[in-house]
Image: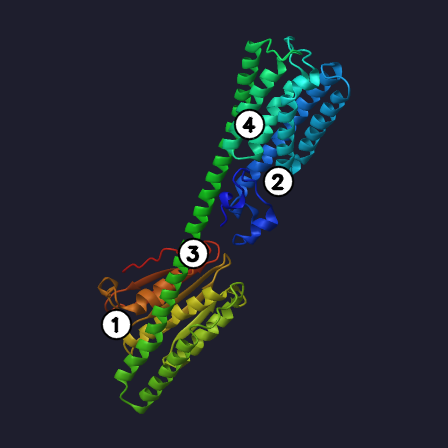
């Protein structure tokens, strides 16, 4: 990100360069309020419009006084009026763009300083003893505000101290070159500097507050990006761990237990499937907007039951045409398939096995894998066992679902997998509940 100091010169204030140029040196973001210098740009626009409004009010007052007075006579009167009030009009109009107004402000402030320095020459010393301020005095605050917006604070401070002092003394010099009202000169110098410094401090305060807001916003986006990256890494870890357990470890266990030709052929098929899934690990992920029907999920579960060569009673309640996100459907299938595989491996060869898929009207998908086998105590499951913790629970939790496990020795096992499109937050981790019954 390019800083203000890099964007601006040594004396110019840090006014945004605009949408096109800013886009060249920052990461493009969709929303305007995510721009690194969004608040600064808003404040600069507010400052520019405020100066335009101040110039309009004081300019109208100055014009009425200038037309009614004759301190400056002859051609010089016309030069002063046309130059200063013409430049002031440009300052007013250019308030729609802070960058353009900066140039107009610098020109006006410089011309104003030259005008007040030559005031004794332009007036011939007339009005030096008058206690009423001439019309040019009412432009002093505008000039100080303009310079505060356009240049760095140190240079603006020099101008704000110098210009009222020059005006104060030039205004009380008579035709003989003598300062006739020193007290008025000092008062004008102090009063003008005070007004100008107040304007400058307000501008600096607003700018610093805007930069602080932008810095805080940038830090928040940085933390958000890091959180997203960590979440992606965690999701990838869960997927890899589950894949290793579901394919590699399952194939090795099957090979260790194979004692017949049929079991050997099944082991070879499992190993081939493991190799294929590992090879596809880096394949492009399906479009996040893609949806899958419940019918697709049920068909896969039936195919998996056939592959396991073990009877599973598969029942469905609800509309098969109901659609859910592809990633959710994939996770529900893989977790359910692992629960079915666990039932074959650990529940024993006897007992009924069933898979119930239920779709609710309120966008709830419920998959229940049940068996009447040996059962187990969930509290005794070692934390390093990946089949339950990673392949089922973490996989479902990663898509915002929940898992409820109910089992006890000799009473079978029920694994209830639930996902709700309304309750589950997008890309969030929901809590998984594991209870013993």
Disc 3/disc 4 C-alpha distance (Å) = 50 Å
Query: Which callout, 1 or 2, points at the residue further toward the start of the chain?
Result: 2
Q: Which residue is mark 1?
A: 374
Disc 2/disc 3 C-alpha distance (Å) = 37 Å
SS at mark 1? loop
Q: Which residue is mark 4?
A: 159
Q: Which residue is mark 3?
A: 228
Query: Which callout, 3 or 1, points at the residue further toward the start of the chain?
Result: 3
Residue at 47% x, 44% y: name it: 217
Residue at 49% x, 58% y: name it: 363
Q: Which residue is mark 2?
A: 99
Please determine whether, in this image, residue 195 is positioned above or below residue 325: above
Disc 1/disc 2 C-alpha distance (Å) = 78 Å
Badge 2: few (under 14), some or many (20 or more) residues near its Cα, within 10 Å? many
Looking at the image, which is closer to me, 74 or 150?
74
Residue 51 spot, x, y in % from top left: 62, 29
Query: Which callout, 3 or 4, points at the residue further toward the start of the chain?
Result: 4
Left or right: residue 417 versus residue 146 is left
């Amino acid at each position: 990100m390019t800083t203000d100091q890099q964007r601006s010169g040594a004396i110019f204030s840090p006014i945004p360069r605009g949408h096109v140029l800013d886009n060249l040196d920052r990461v493009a973001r969709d929303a305007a309020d995510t721009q690194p210098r969004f608040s600064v740009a808003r404040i600069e626009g507010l400052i520019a419009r405020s100066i335009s409004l101040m110039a309009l009010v004081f300019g109208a007052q100055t014009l009425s006084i200038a037309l009614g007075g004759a301190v400056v006579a002859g051609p010089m009167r016309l030069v002063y009026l046309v130059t200063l009030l013409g430049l002031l009009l440009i300052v007013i109009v250019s308030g729609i763009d802070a960058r353009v107004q900066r140039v107009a402000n610098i020109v006006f402030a410089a011309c104003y300083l030259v005008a007040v320095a030559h005031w004794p020459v332009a007036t011939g010393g007339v009005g030096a003893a008058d206690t009423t301020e001439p019309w040019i005095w009412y432009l002093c605050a505008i000039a100080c505000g303009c310079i505060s917006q356009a240049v760095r604070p140190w240079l603006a401070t020099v101008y704000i101290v110098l210009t009222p002092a020059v005006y104060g003394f030039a205004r009380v010099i008579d035709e003989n070159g003598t300062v006739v009202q020193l007290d008025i000169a000092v008062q004008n110098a102090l009063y003008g500097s005070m007004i100008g410094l107040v304007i400058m401090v307000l501008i600096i305060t607003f700018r610093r507050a805007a930069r602080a807001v932008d810095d805080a916003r940038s830090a928040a986006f940085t933390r958000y990006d890091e959180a997203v990256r960590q979440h992606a890494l965690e999701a990838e870890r869960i997927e890899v761990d589950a894949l290793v357990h579901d394919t590699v470890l399952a194939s090795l266990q099957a090979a260790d237990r194979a004692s017949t030709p049929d079991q050997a052929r099944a082991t070879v098929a499992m190993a081939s499937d493991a190799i294929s899934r590992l090879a596809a690990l880096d394949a492009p992920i399906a479009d996040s907007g893609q949806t899958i029907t419940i019918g697709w999920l049920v068909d896969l579960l039936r195919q998996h039951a056939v592959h396991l060569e073990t009877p599973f009673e598969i029942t469905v309640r609800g509309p098969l045409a109901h659609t859910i996100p592809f990633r959710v459907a994939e996770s529900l299938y893989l977790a359910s398939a692992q629960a079915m595989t666990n039932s074959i491996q650990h529940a024993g060869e006897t007992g009924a096995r069933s898979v119930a898929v239920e779709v609710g009207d309120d966008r709830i998908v419920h998959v229940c894998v049940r068996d009447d086998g040996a059962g187990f105590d969930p509290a005794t499951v070692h934390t390093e066992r990946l089949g339950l913790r990673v392949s089922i629970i973490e996989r479902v939790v990663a898509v915002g679902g929940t898992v409820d496990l109910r089992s006890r020795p000799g009473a079978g096992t029920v694994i209830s997998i639930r996902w709700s499109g309304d309750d589950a937050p997008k890309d969030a981790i929901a809590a998984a509940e594991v209870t013993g019954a």
